[in-house]
Amino acid sequence: VIKVLFFPPFLSDCTTTEDLEKVKAPLLDYLASAGCLRPLRSMRDRDLLVQDIVMFQVIHRFQEPFQRLPLFCYEPSTLTADQLDDLFTIRLSPEGSNKRVVEEVVIPFWRDYLQDAEEGPSKLQKILAFATGASVVPPIGFSPSPSVEFIHKGDDDFSSIPLFPMANTCVNCIRLPLHASYQLFKEKFDFALGNTYGFVRA
């Protein structure tokens, strides 16, 4: 690398301090910009200078551009209940409809369940994986955006009121049953999370 950067005589080929000073002289501006200026009193100083230049040329110069690319430097943060709530768009039936009335009862159950799940971060990851197939939010986000829908009697040929949440990971959608109490909602959701393996449709 150094021999490509510096034409003969090469810094790494110098064998005396006099040669080092001669080679260093035309490179002072570069070395100052790179933060590599150091006194050259021995061949050990030459080796340290070469290491400094390699570090600057190969690592530091390319580090910043890569840091601008979140795809390469992405570190998923710990999920929180609020983040998960914001991630999902709640799709409600038309306002004023009977379906909308029962859906609005369940929305607080969903949010309370997320808050309770926050006590153990892995449970929030399970909820996300249940709905999307991914236990962390990808650096480029989800497509389509995750959503919450509701299961009504008569939907999908259900002859009775469904008890458990369902998910379609192909479209990142979780469908919630319409329970009248939070305790029952939580019990059925816990059962679904604990007995779902793999993904696609649960």
Image: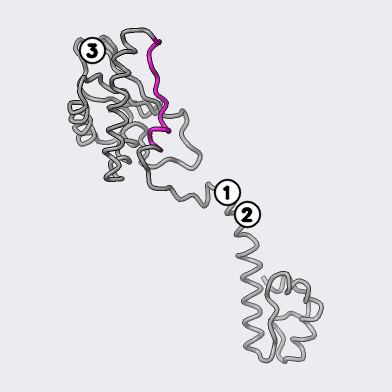
Earlier-in-chain disc, 2 versus 3: 2
Query: Is residue 86 rendered magenta in the image?
Result: yes
- 5 relative to 103 in the view: left or right: right
Q: Which residue is mark 1?
A: 69
Q: Quadrant of the N terminus?
A: bottom right
Q: Which residue is mark 3?
A: 158
Which residue sits at x=27%, y=39%? 117
Tag 3, which secondary structure?
loop
Query: In front here: 109 or 33?
Result: 109
Quarter holding residue 182: top left
Query: Rounded to the nearest whole Å, what is the CA distance between mark 1 and mark 3?
Result: 47 Å
Query: Rounded to the nearest whole Å, what is the CA distance between mark 1 and mark 2?
Result: 7 Å
Which residue sits at x=37%, y=33%? 132
Q: Which residue is mark 2?
A: 65
Q: Amino acid at mark 3?
A: Phe
Query: In front here: 139 or 84?
Result: 84
Instruction: Name the colouring of the figure.
Output: one colour
Q: Amino acid at mark 1?
A: Leu
Which residue sits at x=25%, y=10%? 157
Dot 2 and dot 3 residues touching (CB under 8 Å):
no
Position of residue 8 relative to residue 155, above or below, is below
Question: How many marks can you see?
Answer: 3
Q: Residue 149: where, in percent of width, then height?
A: 35, 21
User: Magenta span covers which residues?
Assistant: 83-95
Earlier-in-chain disc, 1 versus 3: 1
- 127 relative to 2 in the view: left or right: left
Dot 1 and dot 2 residues touching (CB under 8 Å):
yes
